[in-house]
Amino acid sequence: MTYLEIVNKVLVRLRENEVSSLTETSYSKLVADLVNVVKREVENAWNWDCLRETLTVTTANDLFNYVLTDSGTTSRVLNVYNDTDDIQMHYRPSNWFDQQMRMVDTVQKDAPMFYNWNGTSNGDLQVDLYPIPDGVYNIRFNIIKQQDDLSAPTDVLLLNPHLVIEGVVSRAISERGDDGGFIDQEMRYKNMLADFIAIEAGRMPDEVTWYPE
């Protein structure tokens, strides 16, 4: 469903006239802004199937820090693999990396087995790898990447639009000061959100079970 279609669905629910552009009225502008607010809220609520991406870093000899191009700064990592050696990599905290890099007699150089996030560069995440690569390895990052804010009327929402519509209606009712209506609509939105999460969690039971490394 497009950005404009979502805005008009919300306007109809609020008994407002549909619009032909996002900025046609002050109220359509408000609703358009709320769409992106709720979109972010829903994106943060679960590791949605539609937001899953795979990014790859190719290492070079003696270089341990890499930029995960096109990751943005809000991505969540599901898992990381050294595809070249067919092994799953594991997270280690910054103090562990510091110990390996600065507090050991000989820094290890070999196939990467561990990773640590180390800031950002030009709006993308940076990652450190250890052991320091001794050659070329393909490192695969399976991530959850939030969609950029919708801006053009024809932009298509990746999330289920009906869920976002329910959330926007709730926010719009709250903005109007209709406390009674807001409580009912917010409960409807939260229940729908829980239902959608349960549906996806049923397909990914391993992602709701914690396994110690």
Image: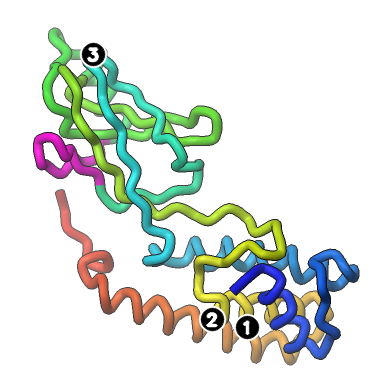
Which residue sits furthest top?
105
The N terminus - image quarter: bottom right
Give the number of the disc on residue 186: 1
How packed is label 1: few (under 14 Cα within 10 Å), some, or many (20 or more)? some
The numbered dot on residue 190 is 2
Residue 85 counted in the magenta span: yes
Compared to residue 25, the image places residue 11 above or below, namely: below
| Residue stretch in magenta | 80-92
User: CB under 8 Å between callouts 2 and 1?
Assistant: yes
Decide which of 211, 128 is in the foreground and name it.
128
Q: Label 2 sits on what residue type?
A: Lys
The image position of residue 155, as x and y in percent, is: 63, 62
Which quarter of the figure has residue 92?
top left
The amino acid type, in three-letter code, at marker 3 is Asp
Which secondary structure lies at badge 3? loop
The image quarter containing residue 172 is bottom right
The answer to whether residue 156 is left or right of residue 76 is right
